[in-house]
Amino acid sequence: MSHMPNPPTTMLSISGVHTYYGNIEALKGIDVEINHGEIVTLIGANGAGKTTLLMTVCGTPQAARGHITFEGKDITRMPTHEIVTKGIAQSPEGRRIFPGMTVFENIQMGAMSCDPEYFDQDYTRVTELFPILKERQNQRAGTLSGGEQQMLAIGRAMMSRPRLLLLDEPSLGLAPLIVKQIFEVIAEINQTDNVTVMLVEQNAYHALRLAHRGYVLVNGKIAMSGPGSELLERPEIRAAYLEGGR
Amino acid sequence: MTKATRPPLNWLALLKESGVAAFVALGLSIVMFGLRTVDQQGGLGLQTRWSWVVLAVVSVFIGRLVLAIYRETRQPPHTYSGTQDSEQNRLAECVQKISKVVAPLLIIFAIVLPFLPFSSRYIIDVATLVLTYIMLGWGLNIVVGLAGLLDLGYVAFYAVGAYSYALLAYYFDFSFWICLPLAGIFAATFGIILGFPVLRLRGDYLAIVTLGFGEIIRVVLINWYTFTGGPDGLSSIPRPSFFGLPFSRRVPEDSETFHTFFSLDYSSMHRIIFLYFLILALALITNFFTLRMRKLPLGRAWEALREDETACRSLGINPTNTKLSAFAIGAGFAGFAGSFFATRQGFISPESFTFIESAVILAIVVLGGMGSQLGVVIASILLIGGTELFRGLEEFRMVTFGGLMVAVMVWKPRGLLAHRDPTLRLHAPDHTPESHKSNT
């Protein structure tokens, strides 16, 4: 896809991570590396542990074993709200916007953890990426359409000036045209705003086309990894995630 | 939808529904109305009042039938959805606009009330009581309405405030004006002490723990006889002074009282009116504080926490600290109200801080519409002023009260004024920038 910054330096490193829900081992020793400036996607079937891995990076739930380091700092045992202040933002599964608050208030909430000095500048940038949010700024967020809510969730995450953006299924339940639009913005955020992206997706075709590299999760383990275009060509990937997909 | 498409009334179903309701009424009223214990020679005897039972059953039957017919003939059928709450919301938005005018008028009315010709001592006493509950309602609104933490033990902080004032005054001879802030701080401290262990709980579980906490405080107050006076309570709590000028008839030597200082004739009304203004000021401070908080990041975080805790955490908000602050601030205002209560009554005992008080305060917040400041005022007037007003109905007072509550649940399931006003409205393309002031 796009040119890679040279030489690649590790931003987020997940090594030997095990995560449990009670007695159930959801992640069984995961090793993932994300370099500065990359878009890395995690694909896999339902229940493979994609969302769990993303949430483990954020500290809810915390990894039982293994280490997660972000820009050289160990964040494995850090509470979620502190991890966010280190430069990781998340657009969680199911968008999780604040439905009773206006669009603008939602965006303000995104900027809670950083210096208000940057607010105007960041807000302008977010509304450049998603002009519809500016049109809807006084509307209650609960009245937005699914696509607009997803844009709001990403926009809100961008307000905390992240260096790493975690996106959990931004294409969930959206029309193909909207998915395309959102994926274009993700690429734009990555290139122009220099934000590294970790993308969890069911929509393997779009995700692998967009990403520099991809990981395939099966039952809590990494089954395969490699550049996005390469994974797209693999027959087993085509069979498992792409046939009849798209 | 046009009227023609509506199917005819299903009378059989309606009669059946009313019949079931009447049957339930029969079961309940036999015990509650039908049998009555009376004193007879040689012990307790039973008296029957079957006419009452018949009256209850018939009225329930007819009432239910009328309600059901009303429901069936209404166009369109009553439905609610989570996000598109159009009708209710539009009405509330309308009230919102009116409230911008109503709120200042209400404040002006509250200020001039004691000087109006019809204001007897009774009216001012009732108004003081209503204002106490308005203040408590506004305080609890921070916890329940804004932060969304269901607190069933709010009266505990009210009790802490009242007892801190009484005990500080008793043991250290502090004046009201020193005790008032101290009582608030004590109550807030108790809020933090309770908050630390329990705020990891959510929803129903939190409600149960706070309910338990309310009882613990009351039981401690009853049993710690040597310190709190136990069930006897604490009496002769000092009255507040007007910045050092007492409201007493007798003028102490080489000092002055309120009426000599302003060269007025002594009247016991001075103190009553002073107390009225005191609670009015305290309540308004609570209100302005809340309105101000809503526009600050912390207040915004409270509201966000109510809507989605997981999202808040992923936005870098520390949920524990945010909840604790809401809990402590709400408790602090209950503490202020408690110390006012103590000084007004001159006597406090654990009797005044039972669960029913928590329930009434919560009912005020919920009835008014969660998070609505004006709603709390209206609900307090209805609930507290209303029960005073219906005193003439004697034993039917609570029934009337219950009936009113049911009516609200039927017609306004989200509270009287349920509408969240944005804290800030940005300029629309054809408007000039305007910072939006919210009153409700």
Image (cartoon, coloured by chain):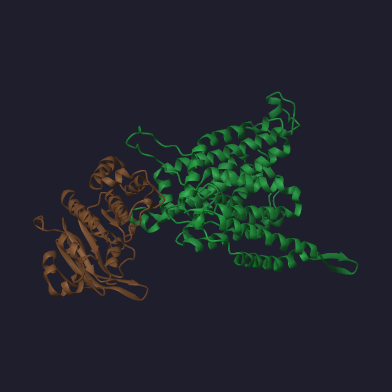
Image position of B141 with respect to B100: above or below: below
Query: Is B44 on the left or on the right of B435, as rendered?
Result: right
Q: Residue furthest top?
A: B263
Q: Colour of chain B?
A: green
Q: How many marks?
A: 0
Q: Residue furthest right?
A: B41
Let me know if residue B217 appears in the view: no
Query: Is B228 on the left or on the right of B97, as rendered?
Result: right
Image position of B19 with respect to B94: above or below: below
Residue A217 picture quarter: bottom left
Residue B62 picture quarter: bottom right
Residue B173: x and y, percent? 64, 42
Q: Colour of chain A?
A: brown
Q: Which residue is depicted at the point 76% across and 64% down? A: B54
Residue B359: x and y, percent? 60, 55
Residue B131: x and y, percent? 62, 42
Let me know if residue A111 appears in the view: yes
Please state which of residues A14 and B194 is positioned toward the viewer in this rendering: A14
Q: Residue furthest front?
A: B4
Q: Which residue is depicted at the point 75% across and 61% down? A: B55
Query: Is B82 on the left or on the right of B208, as rendered?
Result: left
Query: Is B263 on the left or on the right of A212, as rendered?
Result: right
Image position of A128 with respect to B307: above or below: above
Q: Which residue is depicted at the point 43% across and 50% down? A: B303
Residue B4: x and y, percent? 51, 55
Please state which of residues B78 and B74 is positioned toward the viewer in this rendering: B74
Q: Which residue is depicted at the point 47% across and 50% down? A: B326
Residue B403 picture quarter: bottom right
